[in-house]
Amino acid sequence: MITPDDIAQRKMQFLFALRSKGVTDTRVLDAMEKIDRGAFVRGLFAERAYEDMPLPIACGQTISQPSVVGLMTQALNVSPRDKVLEVGTGSGYQAAILSLLARRVYTVDRHRRLVREAAEIFRALDLTNITAMTVDGSFGLPEQAPFDRIIVTAAAEDPPGPLLAQLKIGGIMVVPVGQSDAVQSLIKVTRQDSGFDYDELRPVRFVPLLEGLGRDT
Ligand code: SAH
């Protein structure tokens, strides 16, 4: 049986693993200490929530590896006044972390069931500054644009044009780019007065950004 002491021990190891993989921003680490990843993983895999690995969630999707969540959040450099869009709600874990760092978080997924379940967790945790919606996020969320920050947690072949267009000048977008079945590159896009700067951060592996709404499983 897992005791509360075991859980405390695992959480300490979890934070240690994040630091050793390069998550050093104290605001990000504080947010990841506060948001319990265990609340976002159900069933068989729940007891592996504090390991640094991706895990299966509903609809054939995955909750990302915590160190990748940490590194992406760090690269996004969110400030407390920011309005953030996340494409790829999945379990809701990444959005919950962002909600402690930003003013307002819009998170969208193509699977209705994932959005519904994530929204239930946000309510239970009293994270009132997140709005979760079922839409095809490759078109962004024009009615709430522009955004200070955009994070895409599914791999696109190129940074989607509508998302670039919905980024404020001075804004940052983090997006995994590459073929869906290969290793992708995590790209940080910064919108300048005229044009965009692209930085390649590290290799990552994400599920693909797909078109249209998903059939829930
Ligand atoms: N950020 C999530 C993990 C995301 S997994 C977490 O913290 O748990 C990637 C998610 O992207 C999946 O849930 C998938 O359904 C979603 N996705 C893929 N293509 C999409 C699209 N076009 N629009 C919205 N969501 C999409």
Image (spheres, grey):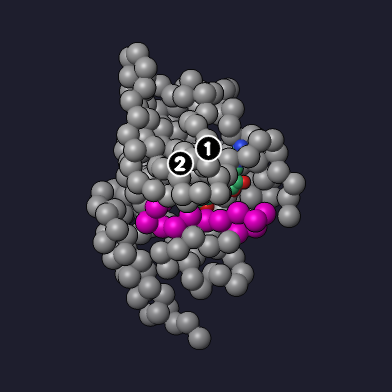
Residue 99 visible? The answer is no
Could you tell me which quadrant the C terminus lies in? bottom right
The residue segment tinted magenta is 57-69
Q: Image point 46% across, 24% down: which residue?
A: 164
Is residue 2 within the magenta segment? no
Q: Nearer the viewer, residue 179 or 76?
A: 179
Residue 7 visible? The answer is yes
Q: Nearer the viewer, residue 181 or 83?
A: 181
Q: Nearer the viewer, residue 72 or 112?
A: 72
x and y, in percent, of residue 41 in the image: 55, 63
**Tag 2 residue:** 176
Density class for disc 1 (Cα within 10 Å; few <14, some 14-19, many ≥20) is: many
Toward which corner of the image does residue 33 lie, by quadrant? bottom left
Is the residue 206 above or below the residue 21 in the image?
A: above
x and y, in percent, of residue 46 in the image: 54, 69
The residue positioned farthest toward the top in the image shown:
194
